[in-house]
Amino acid sequence: MAHRRNSTNGDKYLYKGVKRSLSIENDVEKEYIFENEEDKVIVDQGPKFGKRYVEAILYFLGLFISYCTRVNLSLTVVAMTDPTANENKDIPTFNWTNRNVILSSFFWGYVIPQVMAGWLMTRYGPKWFMIGSVGIGSLVGYLLPPAAVYMGSMGVIICRMIQGFCQGFMIPAVPIFLSRWVPLSERGRICNFIYAASCVGTVFGMMISGSLSASLYGWPMVFHFFSTLGIIWCIIYAICGCNSPAESKSITAEELAYIEMTAIQSKKRLKTPWKGIFTSVPFYALFYTYTCFILGFWILLSQIPTYLNKIMKFDLKSNGFLSALPYIVQFVLSLLFSVISDYVTNRKILTLTSARKVFNCIGMIIPAISLIFLGYCTNATLGVVVLIIGVGTNSAATCSAFINNVDLAPNFSGVVQGIVNGFSNICGILAPLIVQVLVTDEENQVHWRRTFYLASAVYISGAIIFCIFGSGEVQPWNDDKKDEDSEEA
């Protein structure tokens, strides 16, 4: 039996036996098909805490472990190449001159699977791809210390390339989760919560890497520790995780119906609109802005430990904490910005497009100014404060660039994210190499200023382009009627 109800009266009808939900926002009539009349339940909103939040926590933890694995070498490589970093003389150290090449090697593998990963996970679901990503990357982490000893820097480069390739499936999975599990009214908060794993993972990864590298067990324990965390997460997610609400056996009927009613992803298999994507101005605005964010982010992330060590003269233990401190602030501010973003859009204070542009400017321009000041700081304490301001406010951009793919194309958010994240993270390869060219003397602050000027210019250009050409509206190619029933090419 089919029942049709206009949504303008303010009531929300949820059904325990939902078979299909065609949901359009902004007071457009919705159709619900359910099995029995007695299955109908009237509620004001979805459950306060439900399966979608459990899934969000699992995604957070998966991304958290991935970022720990991604960043641990930024600080550990200092201990691997410094004979005075550890009192235990049994811990091997190496005389490597290609440190920045080693740091960039992760991204050689990372950029390869992005578009393919987004397409595959959109079609088959992200669960087992994510488990394979973290699981294989963790196993390779166990092999990295012996590879360094017996194969030198080339062994480390190969291991990091494999880990990078595996992690190429993680970020494209997030927008697929958001489009399948998260209502529009909760999108900002849950999105920022998941992406905050990058801050928390960076903080935890750097602090633990610094402590373990300086401990009796030395730098090899860093890779063993994070690999073990990864294997544990794989087991938990294999048991508890689901690709979609309909697949979950533990979700309540009310929450399932609520998610189905507010779903923003089409239930039908649509042909990927490659032409629409690559001729879309808002897509290119997102692409450019995201690329600027990634380049600035990775210049900071990969070089902060070296900058604090060479310019600010902090030791390894202090370096780990101070390198992580800006990302602690970034995590806190990301949660604050996400709440504000949802508030101003849900209350119609700002349109979705305006909100995305405002938060993108905050997340790009303030860090740009901070980096310029950092290049002239001679006081170590003041330098750390400026660094905290720059990295902390950078989190505002996650309310824009990191979520805009779902705004533009909820049906193809994974594909869009794969394209954007894959090509933009070529900058992850370039960032350490650019620093190596610009900073020929790591103990000369004037050389570091060149790097900070470049990062500042990149950030500001990203803010300008998105303000002019960016959008928060769903694009026409997201749901092309002529392709509704077509199979994927």
Image (cartoon, helix red, strand yellow):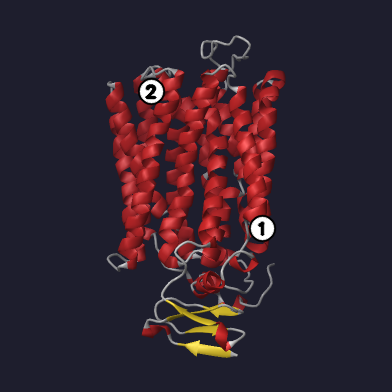
Please give left or right for residue 174 compared with residue 239 in the image: left
- The mark found on residue 120 in the picture is 1
Category of crowding for the residue at label 1, using alpha-carbon neighbours closer than 10 angstroms: few (below 14), some (14–19), many (at least 20):
some
Q: Is residue 119 visible to us here?
A: yes
Looking at the picture, how far across and down is residue 314, in whole percent?
39, 19
In the image, residue 453 sits, relative to residue 341, either above or below, namely above
Q: Is residue 162 visible to us here?
A: no
Q: Quadrant of residue 343?
A: bottom left
In the image, residue 297 sits, relative to residue 413, either above or below, namely above
* Quadrant of image for the C terminus: bottom right
**Residue sitting at x 58%, y 54%:** 173
* Quadrant of image for the N terminus: bottom right
Amino acid beneath label 1 = Leu
Judging from the image, what secondary structure is the residue with disc 2 in?
helix
- The mark found on residue 447 in the picture is 2
Choose mark 2 or mark 1, whichever is in front: 1
In the image, residue 416 sits, relative to residue 161, either above or below, namely below
Q: Nearer the viewer, residue 399 or 458?
A: 399
Q: Nearer the viewer, residue 382 or 128?
A: 128
**Residue sitting at x 45%, y 41%:** 199
Category of crowding for the residue at label 2, using alpha-carbon neighbours closer than 10 angstroms: few (below 14), some (14–19), many (at least 20):
some
Judging from the image, what secondary structure is the residue with disc 1 in?
helix
